[in-house]
Image: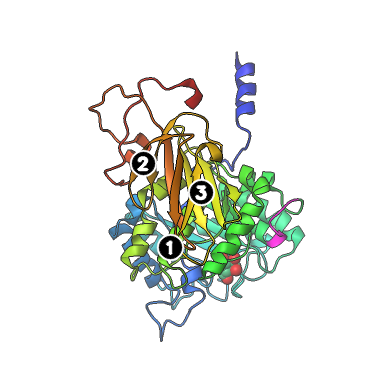
Amino acid sequence: LWLPLISLLALTSATSALDNGLMRTPPMGWMSWERFRCNIDCENDPKNCISENLFRDMADRLAEDGWKEMGYDHVMIDDCWSSMLRDKDGRLQPDPQRFPGGIAKLARYLHDRGLKLGIYGDLGTHTCGGYPGTTLDKIDTDAQTFASWGVDFLKLDGCYSNEEEQQKGYPLMSKALNATGRPIGYSCSWPAYRGGLPPSVNYTLLGEICNLWRNYDDIQDSWDSVQDITDWFFDNQEILQPEAGPGRWNDPDMLIIGNFGLSVDQSRSQMALWAIMAAPLIMSNNLRTLSSEARAILQNGAAIAINQDPMGVQGRRLLQERSQIEVYWRPLSQSASALVFLSRRQDMPYRYHTSLAKLNYTAGSYEAYDVFTGKTLSGLSAATEFTVSINPSGVVMWYVYPKMHYEHPQDDGRYPYFRQKYRMSSSLRFHKPRVVPPSLL
Ligand code: GLA
């Protein structure tokens, strides 16, 4: 009885993830680097320097401004937190001026608010910012130090190490974190230091030892940077897309929405594309001074629900039209899917004509919820021709689902997954299916 069951299980788990049970959906939260960099000038810029105050402030914002409820539950310290010297026992220690309370106390502050703490390390002699790195002989010590502080997540960068050291070090840190007995999410920058593609990068191995990994260059505060990252990830989708899944994610880097480089349309575009990519939703912005537009985009319940879909299948680029319109698609649980129409144009809103059939949808009737306007389009069949108006460097994003038969037409319960976790516009209401056609299962 057991043998066939076991072989069946083996067949169904095509991709296996790091077995720490963490990050079954892409991680969400806030990280310091893109917005606050290595600003250590607390004397002249106390509000914006890398210090325990900054992370406590951001924790307060996450806890009090509705972020945590939407899933943004990590506060992640990036580079430049540590002292230039290890302590007398060879352990990393935070800069005493900027983190007088220590990391353990900061972790408690976060945990008391239902949040998690991430920290940054670097496999190599130094971090990218020049702080003490984790050489191979320090891996166990540093894993134990982080665990003893109550850290929940580690980003392990790769400056100042060579290929062989990375080949040894990234798997060793994975083992060392597991050996601490504390569940610690593990982000590996390894592929970004090896060009991001096979044969230099072994994604099968990465999926077994890391929860997420940086594949490519750092994001900067510009639409150019968002486009460059988007193009690299989708140009290489044949390789990258199959590697993602629950517990193992490609990481195109932080959300820069709310900073200085993106217009409102471009901000929606980053949110939409990161949702399609099943990317970690890690903001790097100033949560104290966010505009209401930026906040509405980052807290868009439908975009988040699409990003956090439990099936965890990364989406793909379907089309690059000569009109400079691109179409992206992601399959979702409950036979739903997400579509993004992106305009690379620089002139005026473009009226793009298509149909679901042209986008490979099978015959049937559908409804579409427009993620950024909150309107529902019903009565769509696969063959229905429709037009979407897409702003320059903007998107139209749809959540598409098959129209069901209703058992209790009076039951206005919302679509179960959305209802559980996210605030949705009241126009998005679903009904229990009476008969689910086998083709939809
Ligand atoms: C590298 C990483 C960034 C950031 C900096 C810190 O560039 O890719 O995300 O962590 O180092 O120095």
Depth check, front residue: 331 or 59: 331
The residue type indicated by label 2 comes to Leu
| Residue drawn at point x = 33 percent, y = 69 percent | 288
In x, y percent, where is residue 154? Answer: 53, 57
Main secondary structure found in the magenta portion: loop
Residue placed furthest toward the top: 1
Left or right of 77 on screen, residue 139: right
Q: Which residues are magenta?
A: 193-198
Q: Earlier in the sequence, mark 1 or mark 2?
A: 1
Which is closer to the viewer, label 1 or label 2?
2
Do callouts 2 and 3 mark residues in contact (Cβ within 8 Å)? no
| Residue drawn at point x = 52 percent, y = 70 percent | 222
Question: Which quarter of the figure has residue 84?
Answer: bottom right
The residue type indicated by label 3 comes to Ile
The residue beneath circle 3 is 276
Do callouts 1 and 3 mark residues in contact (Cβ within 8 Å)? no
Do callouts 1 and 2 mark residues in contact (Cβ within 8 Å)? no
